[in-house]
Amino acid sequence: MARKQNLVQAVGYLRTSSAANVGADKDSEKRQRAAIEGYAKAAGFKVVDWFNDPAVSGADPIETRPGFAALLNRIEGNGVRVVLVEDASRFARDLMAQELGIAVLVKLGMQVRTAGGDDLTNTDDPMKIAMRQITGAFAQLEKARLVAKLKAARDRKKAETGKCGGRRSYAEARPDVVALAKELNGQGMSYRKISAELASRGLLTATGKPYVASAIQTMLAG
């Protein structure tokens, strides 16, 4: 009879940087969980608990993350000393945050292992330390590149349309109301009278109230 393998207890840590990827049915969380479970099974670990930081930037220090704070409390309370993550970027995408976080965990006698088998807290192998730092640097560079790309896209849209994001103007949201307000203003009506006339024709705000004088002024200025 084969001897039963003694599994080492560990906890899994998930992090999603975008709110769009939050939820058990989302690809990011499912992918991370599957990768961790696959590695745990192959490497002799038993995941006894899961911790998650949804919509948390990889640049945020680990001590400010609610999920990771709960993870630290769990580990310190029951003796589990191994944290499993999908890859180094899930632990921290920013190089400084990664190195400082790892230093804290090393001091606590903890390990952080990736689904690829790397021990991020290994301080004995200079090559692994260098590779971890290089990986973190590339992750940080990729993040900076993406931020710059999104900013360039916003700048182009703003140059083309005069705005990017934010609330739609009255002219965009209610062109019919703006057109009538301008017509009534051309007849010499005051802002208050224009508001009353719009209301009498059923042209009200989204909350069902007459437009205030300042709103009429904004419509006419547009």
Image (tube, grey):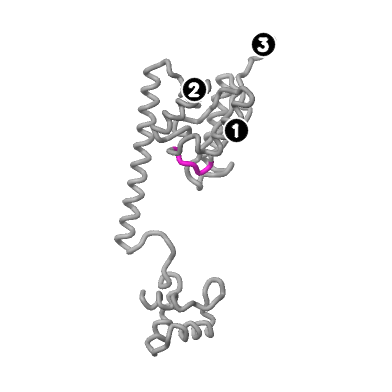
Q: Is residue 196 above or below residue 105?
A: below
Report the residue marked by disc 1. Answer: 50
- For this rendering, which residue is in front, 176 or 196? 196
Quarter assignment of residue 67: top right
Question: Disc 2 on helix, strand or loop?
Answer: helix
Question: Disc 1 on helix, strand or loop?
Answer: strand
- Residue visible at 51% across and 47% down? 19
Q: Is residue 68 above or below residue 184?
A: above
For badge 1, the amino acid type reads Trp
Q: Position of residue 60 (x, y in %)?
A: 45, 39
Q: Is residue 155 above or below residue 90?
A: below
What is the magenta segment's predominant secondary structure?
loop
Image quadrant where one finds the C terminus? bottom left
- Of label 3 and label 2, which has the lower sequence position? 3
Q: Position of residue 151 (x, y in %)?
A: 34, 50
Quarter assignment of residue 72: top right
What segment carries the magenta color? 54-58
Report the residue marked by disc 2. Answer: 107
Q: Is residue 30 magenta?
A: no
Q: Alpha carbon of mark 3 to alpha carbon of mark 2: how far?
A: 35 Å
Question: Which mark, by number, is residue 3?
Answer: 3
Camera-side mark, 3 or 2: 2
How many residues crowd around disc 3 within 10 Å: few (fewer than 14), some, or many (20 or more)?
A: few
